[in-house]
Amino acid sequence: MTNMELVLNMLAETSSTEISKSTNAQGFKGAESSVKKGGNIAKIAREQLEKETGKKVISSKNAKEIRKLDA
């Protein structure tokens, strides 16, 4: 997982949390809705970044493999 993948994951998680708090989401259905909306925010950010850079953000490598390449 690259740094950008981690950042987008954090964006999805924090967006979901903030949406859940602002809508006072209750129960599974409320949480599910918040998570889908938060994930969509990260998806839009990823797609926009890929469009601007012309590069894919998602990597098939895991963190151990990436660390070996950086060393």
Image: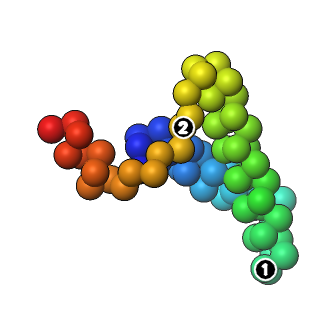
Residue type marked 1: Phe
The residue drawn where x is 55% and y is 27% is 55
Vertically, is 52 above or below 63? Answer: above
Q: Is residue 59 left or right of residue 23?
A: left
Give the structural element (helix, strand or loop) at label 2.
Answer: loop
Vertically, is 70 above or below 65? Answer: above
Can the viewer see residue 4? yes
Residue 4: image location, x then y, percent = 48, 38
Within 10 Å of disc 2 (Cα), the crowding (few <14, some 14-19, many 20+) is some
Residue 57: image location, x then y, percent = 54, 37
Place residue 43 in its image quadrant. top right
For this orientation, the residue located farthest to the left is 71
Residue 10: image location, x then y, percent = 53, 49
Q: Is residue 8 left or right of residue 59?
A: right
The residue drawn where x is 41% and y is 43% is 2
Place residue 48 in its image quadrant. top right
Spatial separation of the CA atoms under disc 2 and disc 1: 30 Å
Mark number for residue 57?
2
